[in-house]
Image (cartoon, rainbow, N blue to C red):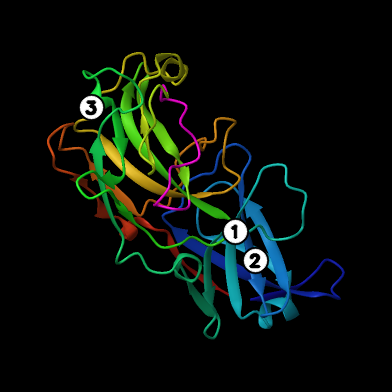
Amino acid sequence: MSSCSGDDTVARSTVTVDISGLERLENGAQYQAWISDGVDLTPLGRFTDVDFPKTFEALTGEVDNATQFFLSVEPGNDSSPAISESILLSGNFVGNAATVDVTQTFGSYTSASGQFVLQTPTDNVSTNENSGLYWYIPSTGQPGLKLPTLPSGWKYEGWVTVPGASGDVNLSTGRFTNVNNADESDPFSLNINPAPDFPGEDFINENVLSAYGVNTLPNLLNKQVFITIQPIFDNSSTGASIAPFVLRPLVGTVTQEAGSGITNTMQINTASFPVGRVTK
């Protein structure tokens, strides 16, 4: 739909964006909508809420010539006019409409899988083994995660939900890009002994746990575990993200306690990924 600006000399047209499955952003981060003619990007506007549909305006020529739509995640206090590396949704216009999803950015997760075990190898205590988890298969020494390689702008992160003094708390096991190596941080571990060289964490450092409102060592049996895809800038000084992002390709429940010899398995959760339709 087109209109003229206040001086009736510059024609402008609208772009309507309708997306389901997004979550409100925190810590100053913003979503930003863009259109492109295949060469140049035109910013449409930024937002943090997830009330849809949303309507934006741009020059009619830019709207008419648009062949693509992008939705990026931009860091807080970002004055750069350029699009960030963290492109979340995209799609190509067919006529005046585009279906947008994560496929162009992340590819397919149909072959993704996850297995993990409970253990706390970083201390010398044998009675708290249900308080840590690692994504690997001890019997073979193989990684427990099968995940696509991420594009620039994103990292994976593991999480477990445990009871806290004021309700459930999501604790990070750390961010990673390679399932064959340890993740980037281990603030909850004690590091008396080395951990497996795979993503995971011991939740046994009581001082750090208390800072998150968790006042006892958590027993992870029957707790929810999940993997997220995080924007690279969404991190705190601990090397873990502030909060889980909306993209959660793998989820699971801890059913096998430490020492059982059986790995816990995760399920593909891509049906929860955001999708949308953009019209011009």
Q: Disc 3 on helix, strand or loop? A: helix
Residue 116: image tag: none
Q: Where residue 98 sits in the image (x, y, percent)?
A: 51, 76
Closer to the camera, 242 or 53?
242
Q: Mark 1 points at which residue?
A: 72
Q: Do the residues labelled 2 and 3 touch (CB within 8 Å)?
A: no
Residue appearing at x 38%, y 51% in the figure: 248
Q: Residues within 10 Å of mark 3 (few under 14, many from 20)?
A: many
Q: Earlier in the sequence, mark 2 or mark 3?
A: 2
Q: Which of 132 and 241 is in front in this view?
A: 132
Residue 122 at x, y percent in the picture: 36, 26
Residue identified by numbered label 3:
130
Task: Say which residue appears at 19% left-offset and 33% top-offset.
Answer: 222
Query: Which of the pair 124/250 is nearer the observer?
Result: 124
Residue denoted by label 2: 34
Decide if residue 183 is on the left or right side of residue 140: right
Mark closer to the chain start, 1 or 2: 2
Q: In this view, does 62 lie above or below 261?
A: below
Query: Disc 1, disc 2: CB below 8 Å?
Result: yes
Identified by mark 1, the residue type is Ser
Residue type, numbered disc 3: Asn
Quadrant location of the C terminus in the rendered image: bottom right
Q: Is residue 197 above or below residue 236?
A: below
Residue 8's quadrant in the figure? bottom right
The span from disc 1 to disc 2 (Cα, nearest Å) is: 8 Å
Q: Where is residue 241 in the image (x, y as percent from the top left)?
A: 51, 38
Vertical comparison of 189 with 247: above or below: above
Is 206 on the left-hand or right-hand side of 116? right
- Badge 1 local density, few (<14 within 10 Å), some, or many (20+)? many
Secondary structure under badge 1? Answer: strand
Magenta part of the chain: 177-190
Q: Is mark 2 on a helix, strand or loop?
A: strand
